[in-house]
Image (cartoon, rainbow, N blue to C red):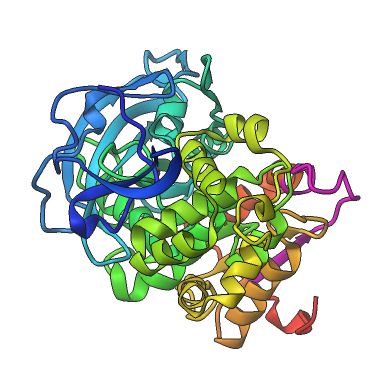
Amino acid sequence: MSRNKSLPSSHRTGGLLAAGAVAGSVCLCLATVPASAAGSDPVVSRGVTIPTFYNPPAELPSANGALIRTEPMKLGLSIPGLDGRAMPGTATRLMYKSTDSTGQPVAVTGTYIEPSAAWTKSGPRPLVAVASGTMGQGDQCAPSLSLENPLTLTGDTTSVGYEALAIYRILATGSAVVLTDYAGLGATDRLHTYVNRLDEGHALLDAVRAARGLPSTSITTDSPTGLYGYSQGGGASASAAELQAAYAPDVPLKGTYAGAPPADLVSTMKGIDGSALAGALAWSISGFVQAYPQMRDVVDRNVSDSGKAVLKDASTMCIGDALFGYGFAKSSKWTKDGKSIADVIAAEPAAQAVLNEQRIGTMKPSGPVRVATGTQDDIVPHAQARQLAVDWCRKGGDVTYDAVKLPNLGDKIVTNHLVPLITDQGDAISWLTDRLAGKSVKSNCWTMPVQP
């Protein structure tokens, strides 16, 4: 079966909204999709066949984090170890139950990796839940699939599994890793709700629960837990740190790394608009249309037929496809009156309310957190990420803030956003490993003035 998931409505309706051509124009129309996501039939997304493992069942368990199914998974980058075990570890593909931003059950996929390296510090082996950075919105872009196939190049899909570097470095410390695909990325029954803080935070915390439910691993309920993410993943880990106390008190956190987190989506949308990563703006709009019915009305009133066609097309893309297809696009070309999407949201109270609900920084995070952001970052703007640290400090959070100071590496071409991912990675992993080993850390909130 070949199917493109695009512009879904709230899945309470049991269907998917597709932006389709009707009588020569593009409209929002309802196309019903069974809850079983086509049963055992494989889904093909932009030339890539999605394994039937990713088709959710019609009925889901009641408990968040409950395992639905698992299977062995081969890592695309691994070598045999001297003791016969693969390095950097042995992977298991997961599907588990979570709860989305509307309070409805959702099946989420991911990967658990049992490391080959020993944990040589005190206490039991830790578990790090990794929230991937931006991979795209098509099913074929799922982070778990990118671990299996680090480079995907077809006529319609370009995907690079860049998170493998951070994951393998974490595994080398002796920590186990669980990676979430988020809601709708991989799992074939809905669209990925890109940068939805509730969906992402829940999926990340429930990935920890799912990993702990696996048999024959070296982690236990006493294993220290950490969260790690950069960019989209930084927002997910930051959100999870805020949500943990109420949503997952059984998952005590020893440390959270939130790199370049998009805490303020209005500011981030302005940074992305017209940049090389402009396609990500389309992903966020389509995801919010699925989760919030009022956003569908905003899109109907303000987005042109050609703009809706862009949303439909982009919703099946990975980040490489979006860079080539919509790099440097301006959202003013997608609207009926030539306003940018940010201006549309500012003029629409319903849309503004949705974005306000997505703001990260309104709650005190659990455990120590480290926020790092490149001072030249113009894609996920530095100022709003730093403001997150300030907001958390004001709420009494245990915050370590680090500014990654680099020269301007090029406006709007993503380099100012991507380079800190690499340059800060070693420090981020060392900081998190120290927290997992029980080392204390002193907040540097007192050194941060309110203004950047």
Find out whether residue 402 is within the magenta segment.
yes
Judging depth in this view, the residue of 258 and 266 nearest the camera is 266
Q: Visible in this render: residue 302?
A: yes
Above or below residue 357? Residue 37 is above
Q: Of residues 1 and 101, which is closer to you in this image? A: 1
Identified at 22% across, 28% down, the residue is: 53
Which residue is painted at 18% across and 44% down in the image? 67
The image quadrant where one finds the N terminus is top left
Query: How many numbered markers are drawn?
Result: 0
Which residue sits furthest front? 23
The reply to whether residue 254 is visible in this rendering is no
Q: Position of residue 281 (x, y in %)?
A: 58, 52
Q: Position of residue 294 (x, y in %)?
A: 38, 69
Q: Looking at this view, is 269 or 294 the one in front?
A: 294
Q: Position of residue 326 (x, y in %)?
A: 65, 38
First to last magenta residue range: 400-417
Q: Is residue 6 magenta?
A: no
Image-based side of 342 in relation to 404, left or right: left
Determine the residue positioned at 53% across, 14% down: 155
Residue 45, position as x, y percentages in the image: 38, 26
- Please tell me whether residue 112 is drawn above or below residue 242 in the rendered image: above
Residue at (54, 42) in percent of width and height: 310
Q: Residue 12 sits in which quadrant?
A: bottom left
Quadrant position of the C terminus in the picture: bottom right
| 360 over 24 or under it: above or below | below
